[in-house]
Amino acid sequence: MRKKMLVVWLLVLVFPIACYGEDIEESSSESSFNALNDLTSRDARKQVLDGTTTIVKKKKAEVYLEFPYDNSPYVAFSTFLLNGPTHHYSGFIETIYYRDKIKIKDMYYEKNPVKTDKIGIYSTDLCFTSDEGVIYHYKNVPYLVSSDQTTTFFSKVDFNKENKKISGKIKMPASKNTYQIELFYTDNDEYHYQETTADKNGAFSLSLNREGIEGKMYLRSSDGLGNYANACDVDKTGMTTYPVPREASKAIEASYKQNTKKEISFVKIMITIISRIVLVILFILVLLRLRVIIKRRQRRKRVK
């Protein structure tokens, strides 16, 4: 009896997940890592690829490496363009050399070859041979697929020179990551920049930590997952507005509508699962009640 009840319980739990599994898979369009928490791009982009997190295992004459991709979903070893060629290994080779100190002679995709059909950060499995002839298998190597054209746009920039402040707004498509705003100074040979993040409406603000000179600064923006804006020159004080192409505005609006549909779909899945659990509990209670009734009848027959 208990085994039957357990089987029924498992079937009811698994059934709704199996039915809606396709919707869950399609919802992760930016990254194959399904982040439940919002990892801020300011910290995520600054992770140092120094090899200290690589998991190393040796089997016979070969070495197996693994990058903890699930813990660092916004780190990329190499960059590819949307719908661009996929067999360019130079980015992987350079990063692995600086990260893991391995000089590579030959490389190929062992599993999950690079795909460039949509933007985001994904992972692949590499197999390569070092200059010393050692064979390496590297699992969960992340790569970025970046858009081949701008998807984000600066719509407003306000340079308040007296208060040493630059604020503004960007038009941005829906993303799993936050959008980073970077301000670069070009008034001398020394490299200097500041950064902040845009809020959910695209608004941002920067308090300058040095003197800002019009014509000697520019802004950049990206989400670290393939969406980015062209550089925007801060060439005058006061408010400056920039037109956003009509087609780009439509694409941005469509991305938020699509994101809303995914959220609604997830809510439906959860409601279905909860309702099935309640039905299972009720079913079990009914079975237990029937069992009690049957036992009572059997006892009465024995007494007679």
Image (cartoon, helix red, strand yellow):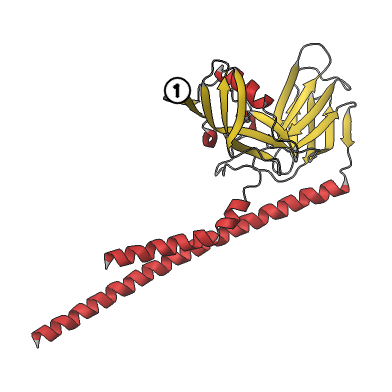
Q: Which residue occupies the extreme top position in the image?
A: 189
User: Number of callouts in the render?
Assistant: 1
Q: Quadrant of the C terminus?
A: bottom left
Expressed as whole percent of the image width and height from the top left, the position of residue 104 reads 60, 20
Q: Which residue is labeled 1 in the image?
A: 61
Quarter of the rendering occupied by the N terminus: bottom left
Q: Quadrant of residue 121?
A: top right
Measured along the vertical axis of the image, is residue 38 above or below residue 232?
Answer: below
Q: Depth check: 95 or 228 in front?
A: 95
Query: Residue 21: x percent and y percent?
Result: 55, 56
> Residue 60: percent from the left, percent from the top?
41, 24
Say which of 288 and 102 sits in front.
Answer: 102
| Three-letter amino acid code at the position of disc 1 | Ala
Q: Quadrant of residue 205?
A: top right
Residue occupying the point 87% across, 48% down = 246
Residue closest to the far bottom: 304
Q: Nearer the viewer, residue 18 or 221?
A: 18
In the picture, measured across the screen, residue 137 lies left or right of residue 143, that is left
192 vs 13, nearest the viewer: 13
* Residue 251 visible in the current orientation: yes
Residue 64: image x %, image y %?
Answer: 48, 28
Q: Is residue 231 left or right of residue 292?
A: right
Q: Element at badge 1?
A: loop
